[in-house]
Amino acid sequence: MATMLIRPQPLGIHPLPTGYLLLPAASASETALAALLRGERPAELPVEWQFYGKAMDDALSDAMTLLNGDNSPVSHYNRFILAGTPADYSQLKNTLPAALQPFLAAAAYTMGIIDQAPDAKGVDGELRAHLLLIQATSHLEDGNINAALSDLTQAIEAATVSPLFQAQLIGTWADIQRDNLGVNHDSVARYRQALKLLGTAPLPMVIGNLWLNLGTTYQELGLLQDAAKAYQETLRSITRSNDPQAYALAQNNLALTYLAAPMLEASDQLRAAVAISALREALTVYTQATYPFQWASAQLNLANALQYLPSSHPEENLAEAVRLYEDLYAIRTRANDPLGYARVRANQGNALAHLGIFDHATTNLREAQTIFREHGEHDAADAIDANLSQFPVTPLG
């Protein structure tokens, strides 16, 4: 292994498939290796590593062309990473040196070619961490959360020679704990540890998604101010172009944290305006056709925010809210989501009442009330009675 590969390897640092490639030993490689371990694209690469640069540039066909002229075992492994098939695996498992077999099996497992993850015996450092990560994935798929976390703990310890890989392993540990064992402050500490290790590394997707997951954790813990700061940090790295789904989720969640906080001071109006802007941004990604559930949620939140936002032009906001509620009936129908439909009808009724359109408002509210009572939502139904008792209200303007 020592004569075949440079150490430490930049495994797990860069996006797939690059993050699975192995670098062969090469002369005058110290500067380039240091840059790769910092998450950077080196200005110059040894001839033997030119394929890796092409992979980093997402020019995979060019990377394959460079590898095709090299018949070394490491080159065969790397070609498998870039364009491997089950037939390739069957051949390579009988021809590659024993030292490369665990990494071949790890890649084949990830590709779904085989169903058994390799063990990490006989390797150390970042190589061991890579194999332990694959084992953790296997345990997670089997529902063995504790075994997955145990493997990741060992992987984190093994990856000290590669801080950026270690950071991503720590983030994965926190993700698994949060998603499967519940949100707690340990997850917060892990995310912060990972972000500290990453520092200013040029890995915006990794850093942005860690901030996003940290923000979600803070939000679920009820720490809204911390959550808002984390989402703001997310949006420093994640954009609509580089990760539209994460961008939309961060914008949506940022809005929710702002809207959930009490509006007690005049400055809070600015926060509400930022929330509305964030929801509009989320809706540039969440469309009814592509993300109907997320679209409906963001659309409803935007309509509600517009209805209650302190404003110098409330009629415009209320009219827009009424239109946004109307659009929601395409998704939230009385037949397939009666309570969701009733909430939209009730909210739209309130907006119509504030506009002075009392007949339509009453129709909406009475229909919503009927549905609430049919489904045992008596508090919501009684609240409608309280609203109706105040009709007519003085129209705005």
Image (cartoon, rainbow, N blue to C red):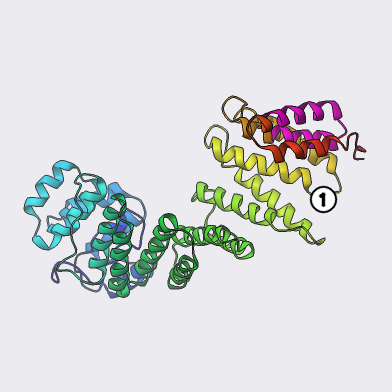
Amino acid type assigned to the residue bearing label 1 in the image: Pro
- Residue 381, horizontal then vertical, whole percent: 73, 36
Query: Which one is in front, 306 or 68?
Result: 306
**Does residue 253 show up?**
yes
SS at mark 1? loop
Q: Residue at x 46, y 73 (%)?
A: 196
- Residue 135, horizontal then vertical, whole percent: 25, 58
Residue 226 found in image quarter: bottom right
- Residue 350, horizontal then vertical, whole percent: 79, 37
Query: Which one is in front, 201 or 368?
Result: 368
Q: Which residues are magenta?
A: 344-371
Residue 27 found in image quarter: bottom left
Circle 1 residues within 10 Å: few <14, some 14–19, many ≥20: some
Query: Is most of the magenta stretch helix, strand or loop?
Result: helix
- Residue 105, horizontal then vertical, whole percent: 18, 53
Q: Is residue 61 above or below residue 158?
A: above
Quadrant for the N terminus in the image: bottom left
Quadrant for the C terminus in the image: top right
